[in-house]
């Protein structure tokens, strides 16, 4: 025995006898659907395009030239105001041994003076076996001072290298 199921939408949907489509009650017939434009409507559309003010390959108008000059002037003005970045650097400076005078080590480190370099707070941190290292904070202007150059050319050369065995960067933060 074959069971037939009744669709709840059967009353709304019907198929035409030719099998050319489905019609739904309350909707427009298929003939009301828009058709693609013909040659006459293409010609009318071309005439409408002539009225557009957009000229992709034309020259700039006076207004556009003036706006471009104003943008260029604004960029120049903003680049003049731009400051160099600053960074906060924390260094670990290690002595040669436990007999190194840490006060003289700190004085020697602080004696390094450069444009864009400002020494900050420092403290002695125990490492082990009676040896302490100097932890010192400094603020630098990025365009003027290179930390690598500071360490290689100033902190680990004569006469400071009498006290300083090595330097390590603990923290490097942009301000």
Image (cartoon, rainbow, N blue to C red):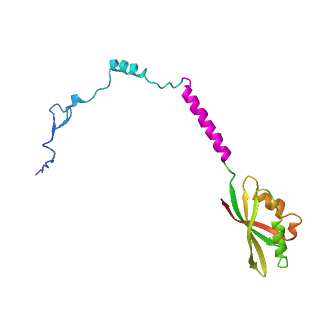
Residue 11 horizontal/vertical position (percent): 12, 43
Q: Nearer the viewer, residue 63 or 138?
A: 63
Position of 83 with respect to 53 (left or right) is: right
Locate residue 64 relative to residue 48 in the image: left or right: right
Above or below, 124 relative to 31: below
Q: Residue at x 76, y 65 (%)?
A: 119
Residue ranking furthest to the right: 159
Displayed quadrant of residue 152: bottom right
| Residue 138 falls in image quadrant | bottom right
Q: Which residue is most to the bottom?
A: 129
What residue do we see at 61% from left, 33% from top? Answer: 69
Q: What stretch of residues is rendered in magenta?
A: 58-81
Magenta stretch: residue 74 in it? yes
Q: Quadrant of the C terminus?
A: bottom right
Residue 104 lies in the magenta-colored region: no
78 versus 19 height, above or below: below
Looking at the picture, does residue 140 appear above or below residue 21?
A: below
Query: What percent of the width, then of the height, locates residue 145?
Result: 76, 56
- Name the magenta segment's main secondary structure: helix
Q: What residue lies at 77% left-to-right and 72% top-to-bottom?
A: 134
Where residue 91 sits in the image (x, y, percent)?
74, 67
């Amino acid at each position: 025995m074959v069971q037939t199921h009744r669709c709840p939408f059967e009353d709304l949907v019907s198929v035409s006898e030719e099998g050319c489509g489905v019609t739904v009650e309350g909707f427009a017939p298929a003939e009301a659907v828009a058709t693609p434009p013909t040659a006459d409507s293409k010609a009318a559309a071309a005439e409408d395009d002539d009225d557009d003010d957009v000229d992709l390959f034309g020259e700039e108008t006076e207004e556009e030239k003036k706006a471009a000059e104003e943008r260029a002037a604004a960029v120049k003005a903003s680049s003049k105001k731009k400051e160099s970045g600053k960074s906060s650097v924390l260094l670990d400076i290690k002595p040669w041994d436990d007999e190194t005078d840490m006060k003289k080590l700190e004085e020697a480190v602080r004696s390094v003076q450069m444009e864009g370099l400002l020494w900050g707070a420092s403290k002695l941190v125990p490492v082990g076996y009676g040896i302490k290292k100097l932890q010192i904070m400094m603020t630098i202007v990025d365009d003027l001072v290179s930390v690598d150059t500071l360490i290689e050319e100033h902190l680990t050369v004569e006469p400071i290298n009498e006290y300083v065995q090595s330097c390590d960067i603990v923290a490097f933060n942009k301000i």
